[in-house]
Image (cartoon, rainbow, N blue to C red):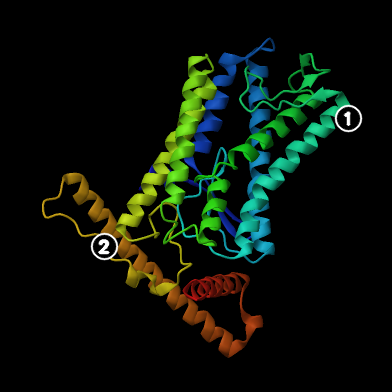
Amino acid sequence: MSDLLTWSPIHLGRWFGTTVRVHVSLIVLVVLTLFEAPFEAGPGGAVMGVVEAATWIALFLLALAIHEGAHALTARATDCELEDVHLWPLGSLAGPSNPPRGVNYMLSVLAGPFVSGAVALSTAAALGIFWDAQFAWHPLGRDADAGAPWIHGTVKAAPMSAPWLVGWFGYVNYWLFLANLLPALPFDGGRLFRWFLANTSLGSGRDGLAAPWTARTTAAILFLVGVVRLLFGQRLDGFTLIGLALLIELMVRSEARMQEDGGYFDDGVFGYDFSEGYTSLESSAAKVRPYRESALKRWRRRRSDLRRQRRIMQEVAEERRMDEILDKLHREGKAALTDEEHRFLVRVSTRFRNRQNTQD
């Protein structure tokens, strides 16, 4: 584990061509929810509290899988290569990267919030039609069972009942939809904003100052709202918003450190971005440092050097792999390629075209 932001110890394989891992924050959330359940149990007792918590986790993980599955399925359908997925409680913990310029990338990023929002609206409609229940639209709940719908607008749905299950499932999707509209990393809104900057004249260089300043403004607003919630006694909501603000600030600082080291590569946050081709290393010169360095600067410089060495090794491996596949394609034809080799060829070719379009 080189960085807490990158620590995803559980590997879930590939979903529609996208590598999926489970971030440590999601593991911590599940463990804490199950641990606290017996102590916060209602009239049903500790056992019933654990059952309710486990059911809520299952609904939550299902909503998360649908959200990320929409990203991956759309990326595969549009032949777009997405970053590796690091599942955390609000989607994928996407770090700074240089976004592709194609429309396919924008569609793939939009797919997650769109599907989550559609599920939330569908559950709200189902609650009204079948149970005369009102969906919990307030994103910052005022009680422990915030996502449970209101039956006839007067009482909360009973735990583990059908409207309770449907209401909570919709409420979790609603939260995923709202959170991923934030125009800052690691949220989908931040990736869309960066894609917009990369495709318009508003972004200069690597998005100029627009992206980090927008992210910091978002973090400041979340922090202030979180403090207000704390002052009014809403501790859980307050700490959640403050935590999100701190996470956004960490992302901004991580990106600044990567740019200082020479760009988006290997151990930056979530892997090297090859969208600018193999020759991008030539333009990434190390930052000139003062003669007398502090211990912190020396440590960061050593980390930068190690990341740069790993990037060079990764580039060499990618080039060797491409030569092998092209040789096999020339000797045996396209039909001889495996699915993995075909995906690799398409991915690298797409990145090369993106680099050519950027240069044009």
Residue drawn at the location 76% of the way across and 27% of the way down: 135
Choose top left, top right, bottom left or bottom right for residue 60: top right
Residue at the extreme front of the image, as rendered: 201
> Viewed as shown, does residue 306 lie left or right of 18?
left
Residue drawn at the location 79% of the way across and 38% of the way down: 122
Whole-number angstrom distance, CA of label 1 to CA of label 2:
62 Å
Residue drawn at the location 53% of the way across and 30% of the way down: 31
Q: Residues within 10 Å of mark 1 (few under 14, many from 20)?
A: few
Q: Is residue 287 above or below residue 282?
A: above
> Viewed as shown, does residue 142 lie left or right of 31?
right
Residue 83 makes an appearance in the image: no
Residue 276 makes an appearance in the image: yes
Residue drawn at the location 79% of the way across and 13% of the way down: 154
Choose top left, top right, bottom left or bottom right for residue 345: bottom right
Mark 2 belongs to which amino acid?
Ala
Residue 307 position in % (x across, y down):
32, 59
Identify the element where label 2 is drawn: loop
Q: Is residue 157 above or below residue 114?
A: above
Q: Residues within 10 Å of mark 2 (few under 14, many from 20)?
A: some
The residue under label 1 is 129
Residue 70 position in % (x across, y down):
68, 51
Comparing 140 with 265, the one in front is 140
Residue 23 position in % (x across, y down):
50, 43
Mark 1 belongs to which amino acid?
Ile
The residue under label 2 is 286
Q: Is residue 219 above or below residue 328?
A: above
Circle nearer the N terminus (1, 2): 1
Q: How many numbered circles are shown? A: 2
Choose top left, top right, bottom left or bottom right for residue 42: top right
Residue at the extreme left of the image, as rendered: 292
